[in-house]
């Protein structure tokens, strides 16, 4: 019987995106494999609908953040928008092992969790944190001793003298069984409550 092949540990390929004016910190789990990237930034997979959700909500156009030829997301346009709005991005794992050859949270083993407190210290204006999947939610709940909200809901937690809202949004992955428009509706309620829309 042959020995099992040891799984390779991947470290996070991106730096945290933390504009100084950030009022919201969005946390996913970990980027997909590089072969699935359409740009060198967060939510890079064309099969992920995060930037379509943003396009729909803020510009009434699901394709707003797609390049005209529709094969890649427009990184510069996304970064300009996020800085203008004050939205920070990172992931709750800084090193993982993939148990299967895909981007599913279910098959990600967190080797090293991100220090979420360290991210929050760098964005003192942040009032809310949102997780976009179960694995990200689990890590945040554990680190911050935060009560887990239902999908589409929120709870609150206290960190370093700050009261923060904690939103649990549906995953923007197409593997999550909900239509884009329905996901956008759930995100819309959060953005309206936080005064982004």
Image (spheres, grey):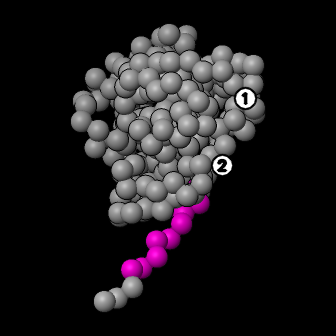
SS of the residue under disc 1: loop
Left or right: 193 as drawn, with respect to 71: right
Q: Residue at x 64, y 29 (%)?
A: 83
Other residues around mark 1 within 10 Å, as few (<14) / some (14–19) / many (≥20): some
Q: Is residue 59 above or below residue 25?
A: above
In the rendered image, is residue 36 in sight? yes
Q: Residue at x 47, y 18 (%)?
A: 154
Q: Is residue 77 above or below residue 100?
A: above
Magenta span: chief secondary structure: loop
Q: Is residue 32 above or below residue 51?
A: below
Q: Quadrant of residue 111?
A: bottom right
In this picture, which residue range is highlighted in magenta? 4-12
Mark 2 sits on what residue? 15
Among all residues in the image, which is located at the extreme bottom? 1
In the rendered image, is residue 65 in sight? no
Q: Position of residue 84 (x, y in %)?
A: 63, 24
The label on residue 123 is 1
Q: Quadrant of residue 1?
A: bottom left
Which numbered disc flags the more N-terminal residue, 2 or 1?
2
Q: Is residue 93 above or below residue 10?
A: above
């Amino acid at each position: 019987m042959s020995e099992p092949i040891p799984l390779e540990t991947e470290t996070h390929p991106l730096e945290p995106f933390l504009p100084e004016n950030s009022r919201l910190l969005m946390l996913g789990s970990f980027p997909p494999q590089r072969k699935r990237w359409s740009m060198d930034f967060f939510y890079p997979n064309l099969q992920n609908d995060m930037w379509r959700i943003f396009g729909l909500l803020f510009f009434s156009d699901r394709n707003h953040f797609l390049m005209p030829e529709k094969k890649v997301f427009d990184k510069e346009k996304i970064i300009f928008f996020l800085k203008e709005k004050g939205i920070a991005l990172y992931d709750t794992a800084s090193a993982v092992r993939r148990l299967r050859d895909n981007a599913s949270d279910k098959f990600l083993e967190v080797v090293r969790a991100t220090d979420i407190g360290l991210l929050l210290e760098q964005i003192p204006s942040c009032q809310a944190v949102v997780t976009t999947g179960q694995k990200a939610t689990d890590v945040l709940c554990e680190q911050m001793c935060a009560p887990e909200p239902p999908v589409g809901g929120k709870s609150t937690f206290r960190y370093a003298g700050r009261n923060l809202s904690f939103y649990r949004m549906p995953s923007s992955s197409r593997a999550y069984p909900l239509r884009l428009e329905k996901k956008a509706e759930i995100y819309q309620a959060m953005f309206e409550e936080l005064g982004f829309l």
